[in-house]
Image: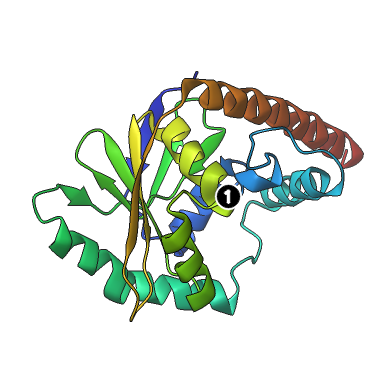
């Protein structure tokens, strides 16, 4: 299993942050390769993701990917959700970080924060029906299982906090524990993907000669 390599302070969304992600599988992208049950995906989705990463690596810069909804969610995080979390849990050492990568350089994540020495934070600001559902069901939403566990895989941390925040609703907070079996499955899929990416890059290089 890889070890954490370094945490970069490059602000999320800026040029340096995009550069750090080139050619790496990141937590927010890992659902292209894994189902919420941590089974390897097959078919068009992982194939399309492979060629997207290949194009990034070949060109040396990231491809556009953020939507207006992601931008809006990011603004709510910055202006309300993360300040709320810091105020609510003022005894915790909450540190903002741009990007964290593994020592083998093939995987990374962009935590909304690192908490002390053994945890991290993932914040979502969903639409109203989803916030209601998360509060009633009281469990980590399936859509974010891969992202949260992938962040623990990358950072090596034993737990992660999930915060779903929506103005005018109660906040939903859940602590998720690291699962070594899940981390092993993630590692196997990421390693296999990276080998395929290297092979595809070599083919593209030969075509360019």
Q: Which of 64 and 47 is in front in this view?
A: 47
> Quadrant of the rendered structure where residue 80 is?
bottom left
Q: Mark 1 points at which residue?
A: 142
> Quadrant of the rendered structure where residue 14 is?
bottom left
**Whole-percent x and y of residue 151?**
45, 40
In the rendered image, the quadrant that contains the C terminus is top right
**Whole-percent x and y of residue 121?**
33, 50
> Quadrant of the rendered structure where residue 79 is?
bottom left
Kindly identify the residue that appears in the image at 38 percent across and 74 percent down.
166
| Crowd band around label 1 with a 10 angstrom C-alpha radius: few (<14), some (14–19), many (20+) | few
Residue projecting furthest to the top: 1
Mark 1, secondary structure of its residue: helix
**Whole-percent x and y of residue 52?**
74, 52
Kindly identify the residue that appears in the image at 46 percent across and 49 percent down.
139
**Whole-percent x and y of residue 135?**
41, 62
Residue 121 seen in this snapshot: yes
Q: Is residue 170 above or below residue 19?
A: below
Kindly identify the residue that appears in the image at 48 percent across and 37 percent down.
149
**Is residue 107 rendered to the left or right of residue 44?**
left
């Amino acid at each position: 299993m890889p070890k954490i390599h370094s945490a970069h302070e490059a602000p999320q969304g800026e040029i340096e942050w995009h550069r750090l992600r080139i050619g790496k599988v990141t937590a927010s992208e890992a659902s292209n390769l894994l189902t919420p049950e941590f089974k390897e995906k097959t078919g068009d989705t992982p194939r399309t993701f492979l060629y997207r990463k290949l194009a990034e690596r070949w060109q040396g810069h990231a491809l556009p990917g953020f939507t207006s909804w992601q931008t809006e969610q990011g603004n709510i995080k910055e202006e309300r959700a993360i300040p709320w979390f810091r105020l609510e849990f003022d005894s915790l050492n909450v540190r903002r970080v741009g990007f964290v990568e593994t020592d083998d350089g093939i995987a990374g994540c962009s935590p909304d924060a690192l908490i002390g020495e053994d945890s991290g934070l993932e914040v979502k600001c969903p639409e109203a029906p989803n916030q209601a559902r998360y509060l009633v069901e009281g469990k980590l939403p399936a859509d974010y299982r891969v992202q949260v566990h992938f962040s623990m895989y990358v950072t090596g941390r034993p737990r992660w906090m999930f915060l779903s925040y929506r103005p005018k609703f109660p906040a939903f907070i859940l602590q998720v524990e690291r699962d070594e079996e899940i981390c092993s499955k993630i590692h196997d899929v990421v390693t296999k993907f990276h080998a395929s990416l290297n092979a595809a890059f070599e083919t593209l290089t030969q075509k360019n000669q």
